Image (tube, rainbow, N blue to C red):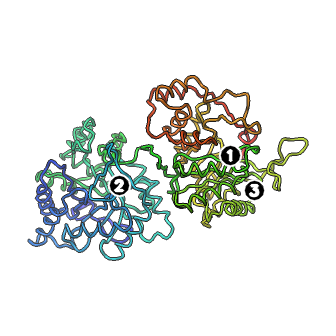
Amino acid sequence: MLAEDSIMVMNDGHKIPVIGFGTYAPEKFPKSLAEEATKVAIEVGYRHIDCAHMYGNEPEVGRAIRAKIADGTVRREDLFYTGKLWSTSHSPELVRPALEKSLKDLQLEYLDLYIIHMPIELKPGDDLFPVDENGHFIYENTDIRDTWEALEACKDAGLVKSIGVSNFNRRQLELILNKPGLKHKPVCNQVECHVYFNQGKLLEFCKSKNILLVAFSALGSSRDEAWIDQNSPVLLEDPVLNAIAKNYSRTPAQVAMRYLLQRGIVVLAKSFNPTRIKQNFQVFGFHLSAEDMKTIDGLNKNMRYDTAAIRIRPTMELKEDSRMMMNDGNKIPIIGFGTYTPQKDHNSLPGHCTEFAIEIGYRHIDCAFIYGSELQVGRAIQAKIRDGTTRRKDLFYTGKLWSTFQAPDKVRPALEKSLKNLQLEYIDLFLINAPRELKPGEDLIPVDENAPSDYQDSVIRKTWEAMEACKDAGLVKSIGVCNFKCRQLELFLSKPGLKHKPVCNQVECHIYLNKKKMLALCKYQDIVLVGYCVLESSKDEKWIDQDNPVLLEDPVLNTIAKKHRRTPAQVAIRYLLQRGIVVLARSFKYNGIKENFRVFDFHLSAEDMRTLDALSKHMHYVKTSHWEDYQLPI
């Protein structure tokens, strides 16, 4: 039975009061307001105070806390204070100084709970919201798991009792939970949660991991124009909520809070009106019936009030160094340089062009053992690292497991052979080149006199287990697949005991084959779609159907390109990027390599995108029907 002193036990053994007082106030209000309101809250009975460095009022809130301790209203050990690490201090060396700054402002010896405010890093500095000359936020790329390790160190040092996160989705939580060597699990995830946004799925996940859900914007009533959508309905005016409140002789706010409390959610109530501060704490003397809980469940609209995380979150602002987060936490540059060349052009062309691509700014290099050019590409990479153009950690290399090496005992030797050719210690991404095995041997495309190729019935799921072992051994950071159809991908994902999900599916994709269904499936499964043959102008008769129309001569594509004063290739690439597809651009002409990378300073309109969508003919350039029609053995 919930009472005024009700607490929940967190997964580290510490206890958190089930109702807290939120101290954020819009800039238009004087900071002294937070100080006075916090005093009132403590006098009323709140023992959980929630604040943050970003709110800019920790000194005032600290004074209120110390005043109420000094006058005997409360003891420090009976108070629970939550602070937050702001996004400009995610770099590990900045975490402890940020916490110590909060402690100094508050004049406290320790915090009860310190949480990562958002899973987004902004440029470090005095400016809390750093922007560039165009008004766009300036982001950084610290791995959130490194930030977490720094928080763990602060807990071990006794500066904070418990550590958690805020505004994390399930995938971001799993990044930390699955971190090798995790020492301290997050005790909570603080998120927007209210009657109109009840976070049902996230609550279920958090409960399964023994992580508490803490709700901010629980009343959805703030109308701060800086963060709150002014066109959204006022939650406390909802007629159903008001009818239920009337039945219990309670306020709509009390019912909205009670609804969350009965679902096992810690609630942060915010008001600077003394009467409402008191009312919001009076939620312990009544109980909502199961029928009322079900009725309020039905009010869920999956609607946010707080747009802060959305406004600050990178909206795939496409830049030359843009990277996309994969489902294992590693990041892939959104544009890559493809290195395949027809056999007649092999010589030194892939190496020279790879060097030039890296000089231009490409940081994603795509190659494969079957291309026969790993030696040249590897030498190019090493040359650009030696001359200081790039660093190994800034490059992203994709390699592929060819179909004659899919037997599980051949996977690691094949990867090690590629590593030796490339003179690299690890590969960033290793893909199964095609969902079908060819007969092992020195001949990469074995044939007999009765069939175009000699296939084996190897179970490719066993191949995947060998790929997983390579990842676990540190030979490759991420693993994925290539040329899988929707059905094949779904069969693969349903593999019992799947340890590492494919991070991507690399497929032929362009304006004539826009892969709409595959893209939808991949987004649903949190798998990145990578497009090859995005421009297809190659005349390689071995792989390319010579009877197909030339994509870059399409009149509609050329009209849109002329409007934007761009090349047809640039528009074709930009179209895929704006759909959230990683693009592999291939050219062996220096001007083409350079032009294909210049796709970041223009934007296709919604009308342009619809027009290009309509060009899809479901037409392949690459002759791969023999493996695409193959059904994976179970």
Label 3, label 1: how far apart the Cα atoms are: 19 Å
Relative to 316, is 109 above or below? Answer: below
Residue 634 visible in the current orientation: no
Label 2, label 3: how far apart the Cα atoms are: 44 Å
Q: Amino acid at mark 2?
A: Leu
In this view, the residue farthest toward the bottom is: 157
Q: Earlier in the sequence, mark 3 or mark 1?
A: 1
Looking at the rendered image, the disc whose residue lies closer to the viewer, 2 or 3, is 2
Residue drawn at x 47%, y 29% is 565
Q: Earlier in the sequence, mark 2 or mark 3?
A: 2
Q: Which mark is residue 271?
A: none
Image location of residue 252, percent across then percent down: 21, 44
Classify residue 473 as left or right of residue 345.
left
Q: Secondary structure at mark 2?
A: loop
Label 2, label 1: how far apart the Cα atoms are: 37 Å
Query: Which quadrant of the figure has residue 116?
Result: bottom left
Between 42 and 244, the one nearer to me in the picture = 42
Relative to 154, is 335 above or below? Answer: above
Q: Which mark is residue 340?
A: 1
Classify residue 180 as left or right of residue 422.
left
Image location of residue 207, percent across then percent down: 42, 58
Q: Which residue is mark 3?
A: 405
Q: Which residue is mark 2?
A: 122
Between 593 and 529, the one nearer to me in the picture = 593
Relative to 328, is 181 above or below? Answer: below
Between 351 and 401, the one nearer to me in the picture = 351
Q: Secondary structure at mark 3?
A: helix
Q: Amino acid at mark 1?
A: Tyr
Residue 69 visible in the current orientation: yes
